[in-house]
């Protein structure tokens, strides 16, 4: 072959090779430059914007010796994202020794500026260190604090009942009427002179297990009291107006209605009784008047719950209000007896209403409000994430823990019992009194307004009132501290001391550091104990949480990829919490994915899974809690990972309808509501895994739509090896196939509960600062999804 022929042959091979390379690249994103991309309807979205609402920190915490005899001892560390130090802000726990630091990868909301490190040393001394988040790599050495406390895990015993329980009711062994059809039905009791053939006190109706009643029922009984027992399902799109009758939801049963109201209830029997393992859901107001309601199962409503006119509500199960700006209202001699978890937007205890909270029980609300004649008897935890306030009176008896971002007292009386803690970031007070028993604490940041404030104690032992922010002068504020109270104001100086000191009497003292010991309890977190103890007790289980130990985050997806949809971002909405359990070496041994499918605004078949991007499938020992419902689109191998995949892909469910049975749309149409259960997927690793390999940043949650190969991921996350690249279109972003060419996305993750749009309402219109956040590349309004004034159009929300 001549040299010329060889040259021609070489060029032909090169052209063939280049052509093959072009063909091979047709399933990849086109190589376009930034200024060639289209502009989104929002404006120009930065090329590299990743749409993340969180930031990830690699944190290293070093500890110093607690003394020569303790050098080998373990320092227990807890990391919080709020100075309130409650379960809603705990994000990680671990252990360290001098020379052996605690290293952890954590993810927090983008606006978060500080972390708070709670350290328990081997000698029992504890301290809290604020840590500014100013880098993605933080290495901090915890040094001896001038204000160290003791954590002796002393149990707290309140001088009250351990729980507010309602006695179990007697269930008939035989029922007078079996309701197993959708024929016309009116619930009526016995007429005068009639009795039950089975000895039942009240005429009893049963919807049996396996049957779903969808036809409306007449609840306006005019004879003697009657009871409807639901062992199957009652699902009606009308209001249950209960007159001279009760509904009992038996274990395994469910009732879904469009509101509840009560008329005349003469029998000594609860108007609503929900057994453990049963569920009640309402899409409209639940109004209980002059009656008793008992929840031992799950009660969920998207509207207000009103307990009034001498009604009693015993909650021993789970209570949740999902609707925005709706409330649990206790008024007019109504009373709540709570010993189960409560999560509602607002709690109002008004005219002569009473709220009783049991030990060990957590009540979470954005706003707590009280008015004249109202009472709160708290033996557990009340967490008011936005505000705890009152007007015109009200009394709080705190036996354990109350936390609030803002506390605002207006003619309030608060009685703080021994071992209790009230912890607030800011405090305003007018014409109010706090009575502090010895061993109680009130901690706040700044005091914004103060007038007519009296703090008293008649105890022989000291209590602690502490402010770490600014405090107005007491000179003209008609304020007094009387009795054995230590007022610690960290901003106190020789120059301003006279502005406060004259308001103290009868043993009250003031200083800028604490000198009086407050015994540690499980309620006060040992934040006031400053004397060491020989027996600091056992440490906590080590874990990392996202977004926190008791908080919830949210995934929200569109399902039209690779095409644009309506951007209501409700085709799949999932509330979730991710927990990793660690051994004593801070290695991950288990992963827990707790979740609830809140909404499905899609007619397509949607399945969900997550890939642990840094973990091989062979590293997984077992998976439990998956809802397969068949073998498609995800096949599941013996260890719980997806079949045929090298990385650890964990199927969560094969069809959203297997998790929550529904027709049409699920919880996206206003006025329609279906309760959704909570589930848990548990992953156990065959051997401990380095903690840095598992975090929310490598937790790749995705959905598949109609087929396994069509995956939709959040921006910044990669497709799995099972992804069908031929489904990718030409209008995708050159840097990320899960962004449109103009930069828009198909999914977002929020480090909190997210109030999603009603069907067809674009997130752009629903959230007024969404566009500014996107076109600024996340620099502006990083909290755009928050419930703040002017941030969202509530009329467009579900």
Image: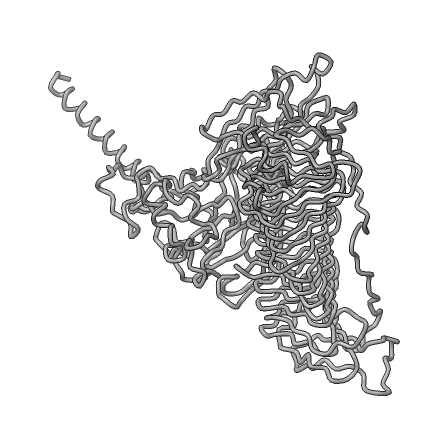
Q: Is residue 3 left or right of residue 468?
A: left
Q: Is residue 735 above or below residue 414?
A: above
How far from the left and from the top, in percent, is residue 633? Answer: 51, 49
The residue lying toward the viewer, choosing from 193 and 72, is 72
Q: Is residue 210 visible?
A: yes
Is 570 in front, or is 284?
A: 284
Q: Position of residue 725 (x, y in %)?
A: 37, 42
Q: Residue at x 67, y 23 (%)?
A: 75
Quarter-wise, where is residue 203 in the image?
A: bottom right
Residue at image x 86%, y 82%? 195
The part of the image, by quadrant, that contains residue 501 is top right
Single out the residue that lies furthest toward the left.
Answer: 4
**Quarter where residue 230 is shown:** bottom right
Look at the picture and state if 677 lies above or below 102.
below
Q: Nearer the viewer, residue 235 or 25?
A: 235
Which residue is at a point 62% across and 44% down the rendered structure image?
Answer: 550
In this view, the residue in front, 165 or 715, is 165
Colour scheme employed for the rendering of this structure: one colour
**Residue 260, x across and y down, in percent:** 64, 71
Q: How many numbered marks have been drawn onto this rendered protein structure?
A: 0
Q: Is residue 675 above or below residue 785?
A: below
Residue 711 seen anywhere in this rendered image of the structure: no
Image quadrant where one finds the N terminus: top left
**Which residue in the rendered view is the most extreme toward the bottom?**
192
């Amino acid at each position: 072959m001549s040299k010329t022929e060889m040259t021609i042959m070489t060029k032909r091979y090169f052209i063939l090779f280049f052509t093959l390379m072009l063909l091979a690249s047709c399933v990849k994103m086109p190589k376009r430059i930034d200024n060639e991309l289209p502009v989104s309807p929002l404006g120009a979205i930065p090329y590299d914007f990743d749409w993340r609402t969180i930031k990830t920190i690699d944190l290293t915490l070093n500890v110093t010796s607690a003394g020569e005899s303790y050098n080998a001892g373990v320092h227990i560390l807890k990391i919080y994202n709020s100075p309130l130090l409650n379960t809603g802000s705990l994000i990680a726990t671990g252990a360290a020794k001098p020379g052996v630091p605690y290293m952890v990868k954590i993810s927090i909301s983008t606006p978060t500026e500080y972390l708070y490190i709670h350290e328990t040393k081997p000698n029992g001394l504890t301290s809290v260190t604020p840590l500014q988040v100013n880098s993605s790599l933080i290495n901090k050495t915890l040094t001896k604090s001038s204000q160290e406390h003791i954590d002796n895990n002393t149990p707290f015993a309140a001088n009250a009942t351990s729980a507010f329980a309602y006695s179990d009711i007697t269930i008939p062994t035989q029922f007078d009427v079996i309701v197993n059809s959708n024929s016309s039905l009116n619930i009526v009791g016995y007429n005068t002179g009639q009795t039950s053939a089975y000895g039942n006190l009240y005429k009893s109706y049963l919807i049996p297990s396996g049957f779903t009643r969808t036809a409306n029922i007449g609840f306006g009984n005019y004879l003697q009291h009657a009871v409807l027992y639901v062992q199957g399902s009652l699902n009606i799109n009308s209001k249950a107006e209960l007159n001279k009758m009760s509904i009992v939801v038996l274990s395994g049963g469910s009732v879904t209605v469009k509101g509840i109201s009560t008329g005349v209830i003469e029998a000594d029997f609860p108007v609503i009784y929900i057994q453990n393992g049963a569920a009640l859901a309402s899409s409209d107001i639940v109004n209980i008047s002059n009656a008793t309601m008992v929840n031992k199962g799950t009660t969920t409503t998207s509207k207000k719950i009103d307990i009034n006119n001498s009604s009693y509500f015993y909650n021993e199960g789970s209570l949740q209000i999902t609707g925005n700006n709706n409330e649990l209202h206790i008024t007019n001699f109504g009373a709540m007896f709570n010993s189960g978890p409560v999560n509602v937007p607002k709690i109002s205890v008004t005219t002569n209403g009473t709220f009783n909270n049991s030990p060990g029980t957590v009540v979470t609300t954005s706003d707590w409000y009280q008015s004249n004649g109202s009472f709160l008897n708290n033996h557990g935890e009340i967490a008011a994430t936005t505000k705890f306030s009152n007007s015109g009176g009200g009394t709080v008896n705190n036996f354990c823990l109350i936390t609030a971002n803002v506390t605002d007292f207006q003619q309030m009386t608060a009685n703080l019992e021994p071992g209790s803690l009230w912890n607030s970031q800011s405090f305003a007070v007018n014409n109010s009194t706090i009575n502090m028993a010895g061993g109680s604490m009130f901690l706040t940041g700044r005091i914004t307004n103060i007038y007519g404030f009296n703090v008293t104690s008649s105890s022989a032992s000291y209590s602690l009132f502490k402010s770490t922010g600014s405090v107005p002068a007491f000179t003209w504020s008609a304020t007094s501290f009387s009795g054995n109270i230590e007022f610690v104001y960290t901003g106190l100086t020789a120059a301003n001391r006279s502005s406060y000191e004259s308001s103290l009497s009868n043993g009250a003292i003031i200083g800028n550091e604490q000198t009086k010991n407050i015994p540690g309890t499980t309620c006060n977190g040992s934040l006031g104990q400053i004397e060491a103890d020989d027996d600091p007790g056992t440490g906590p289980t080590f874990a990392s949480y996202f977004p926190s130990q008791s908080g919830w985050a949210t995934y929200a997806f569109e399902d039209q990829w690779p095409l644009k949809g309506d951007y209501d971002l409700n085709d799949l909405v999932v509330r979730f919490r991710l927990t990793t359990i660690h051994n004593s070496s801070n290695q991950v041994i288990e992963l827990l994915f707790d979740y609830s499918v809140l909404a499905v605004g899609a007619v397509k078949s949607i399945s969900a899974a997550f890939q642990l991007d840094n973990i091989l499938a062979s590293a997984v020992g077992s998976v439990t809690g998956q809802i397969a419902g068949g073998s498609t689109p995800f096949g599941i191998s013996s260890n719980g990972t997806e079949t045929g995949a090298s990385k650890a892909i964990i199927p969560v469910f094969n069809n959203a309808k297997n998790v929550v049975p529904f027709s049409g749309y699920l919880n996206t149409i206003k006025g329609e509501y279906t309760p959704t259960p909570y589930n848990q997927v548990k992953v156990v690793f065959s051997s401990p895994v380095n903690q840095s390999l598992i975090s929310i940043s490598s937790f790749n949650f995705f959905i598949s739509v109609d087929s396994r190969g069509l995956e939709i991921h959040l921006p910044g996350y990669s497709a799995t090896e099972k992804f069908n690249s031929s489904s990718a279109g030409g209008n995708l972003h050159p840097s990320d196939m899960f962004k449109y060419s103009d930069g828009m996305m198909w999914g977002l993750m929020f480090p909190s509960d997210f109030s999603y749009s009603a069907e067809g309402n674009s997130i752009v219109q629903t959230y007024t600062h969404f566009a500014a956040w996107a076109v600024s590349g996340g620099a502006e309004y990083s909290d755009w999804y928050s419930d703040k004034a002017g941030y969202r159009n509530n009329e467009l929300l579900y």
